[in-house]
Image (cartoon, rainbow, N blue to C red):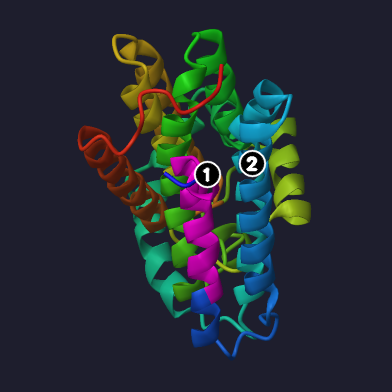
C-alpha cells in the first residue's frame, strides 16, 4: 500500500463521515447556519490524520505519535458532533415529537416506570443520572482498558466499531430535526427527584449540547457500540463486554426517565449500534482489519 494511504480503519471512518457531511450539505440549502464549513472540516481533518500517519512512519517519535493516533479520534468525534449544529433549521415543526411523546406517557405513566424507579427514593434515580453523566467518558475508559489489558494493538479495531455506531447516529440528525422532551414537554412525566448529578447533567446539556435533534440517541448508540467493540476485541474476556452492555441498558432507561430522549430515540440508537457492530464484525471476518495496526 502506498505510504499516503496508510491510515487506520477508524481514521477512514472519520474521513468518510466528514466527507458524507460535506456532500450532504448541498441538499439542505434552507439551513441558515450551513455554508462551506463542512468542506473545510473535511480538508482539515483529512490533512491532520494524513500528517500524523506520515510522522509515525518517518519520524523519530513513532511510538508517541502512534499513541496520539489512538486517542485523537475521540476529540474528532466531538468536532463531528458539534458540526451537526450547522444543520439547525430555522424552526421546528414538532410533528414528530407530538407522536413520540405518546409512547413515553404510556411507558412512564400507564406502565408505571417512573413510579417503579422512584419507589426506593433517590437511589435508582441517582444511579440512572450517574450513568448518563459517565457516557461522555465511555470511549476514553475503553481505550484505557485496552491499554491496561495489554491490547493496545486492538485500539483501532475497537474504535472502528465505536466510531461507526456513534457517527451513524450523527449522520441521521439532519433528517429528523427535533427537540428533547425536557424542553418541549417539561411538565409531562418529569422526574420527581432531583439530585446534584442531574443538575450537572442539565448544566452540561445547557452549555455544551447541540440543538438539532435527538433522534436517534447517540448516547445510547455509542454506549452499545462500545460494548460490541469490547466483545470483538477481548476474546476470552467477555465479562468486560457484558458489564458495559448492562451499563448501556441502564443508560437507555436513564435517557427516557430523565426526559433527555424519547423512547423511540433509544430504540433507534440501539438499532444503529447493532448495524455498526454487525458491519464491523463482517469486516473483521473478511480480514479487513490487520492483526496489528498500532505501533507498540
Q: Above or below — where is 190 with respect to 129?
A: below
Query: Which residue in the protein does label 1 denote?
Result: 3
Asked whether 198 falls inside the magenta stretch, the response is no
What is the magenta segment's predominant secondary structure? Answer: helix
Q: Quadrant of residue 183?
A: bottom right
Local crowd at mark 2 within 10 Å, few (<14), some, or many (≥20)? some
Is there any visible trace of residue 127 in the rendered image?
Answer: yes
Asked whether 21 falls inside the magenta stretch, the response is yes
Q: Is residue 283 left or right of residue 198?
A: left
Q: Quadrant of residue 22?
A: bottom right
Sequence-wise, the earlier of marks 1 and 2 is 1
For the point 67% across and 47% down, which residue is it?
51
Q: Position of residue 213 (x, y in %)?
A: 54, 66
Image marks 1 and 2: residues in contact by CB distance under 8 Å: yes
| Marker disc for residue 54 | 2
| Marker disc for residue 238 | none
Q: Is residue 72 left or right of residue 26?
A: right
Q: Secondary structure at mark 1?
A: helix
The C terminus appears in which quarter of the rendering? Answer: top right
Q: Position of residue 205 (x, y in %)?
A: 70, 51
Residues rendered magenta in the picture? 3-22
Is there any visible trace of residue 211 in the rendered image?
Answer: no
Q: Position of residue 108 (x, y in %)?
A: 41, 48
For the point 37% across and 42% down, which residue is it?
112
Amino acid at each position: 500500500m502506498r505510504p499516503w494511504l496508510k491510515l487506520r480503519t477508524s481514521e477512514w471512518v472519520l474521513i468518510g463521515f466528514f466527507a458524507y457531511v460535506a456532500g450532504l450539505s448541498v441538499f439542505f440549502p434552507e439551513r441558515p447556519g450551513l455554508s462551506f464549513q463542512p468542506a473545510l472540516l473535511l480538508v482539515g481533518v483529512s490533512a491532520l490524520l494524513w500528517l500524523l500517519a506520515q510522522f509515525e512512519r518517518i519520524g523519530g517519535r513513532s511510538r508517541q505519535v502512534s499513541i496520539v493516533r489512538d486517542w485523537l479520534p475521540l476529540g474528532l468525534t466531538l468536532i463531528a458532533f458539534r458540526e451537526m449544529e450547522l444543520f439547525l433549521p430555522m424552526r421546528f415543526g414538532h410533528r414528530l415529537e407530538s407522536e413520540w411523546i405518546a409512547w413515553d406517557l404510556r411507558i412512564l405513566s400507564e406502565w408505571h416506570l417512573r413510579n417503579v424507579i422512584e419507589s426506593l427514593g433517590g437511589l435508582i434515580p441517582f444511579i440512572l443520572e450517574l450513568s448518563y453523566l459517565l457516557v461522555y467518558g465511555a470511549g476514553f475508559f475503553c481505550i484505557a482498558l485496552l491499554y491496561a489489558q495489554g491490547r493496545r494493538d486492538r485500539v483501532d479495531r475497537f474504535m472502528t466499531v465505536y466510531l461507526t455506531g456513534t457517527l451513524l447516529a450523527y449522520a441521521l440528525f439532519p433528517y429528523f430535526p427535533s427537540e428533547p422532551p425536557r424542553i418541549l414537554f417539561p411538565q409531562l412525566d418529569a422526574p420527581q427527584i432531583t439530585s446534584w448529578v442531574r443538575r450537572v447533567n442539565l448544566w452540561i446539556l445547557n452549555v455544551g449540547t447541540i440543538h438539532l435533534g435527538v433522534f436517534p440517541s447517540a448516547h445510547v448508540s455509542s454506549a452499545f457500540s462500545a460494548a460490541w467493540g469490547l466483545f470483538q476485541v477481548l476474546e476470552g474476556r467477555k465479562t468486560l463486554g457484558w458489564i458495559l452492555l448492562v451499563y448501556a441498558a441502564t443508560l437507555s432507561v436513564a435517557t427516557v426517565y430523565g426526559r433527555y430522549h424519547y423512547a423511540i430515540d433509544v430504540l433507534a440508537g440501539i438499532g444503529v449500534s447493532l448495524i455498526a457492530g454487525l458491519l464491523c464484525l463482517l469486516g473483521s471476518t473478511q480480514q479487513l482489519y490487520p492483526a496489528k495496526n498500532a505501533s507498540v
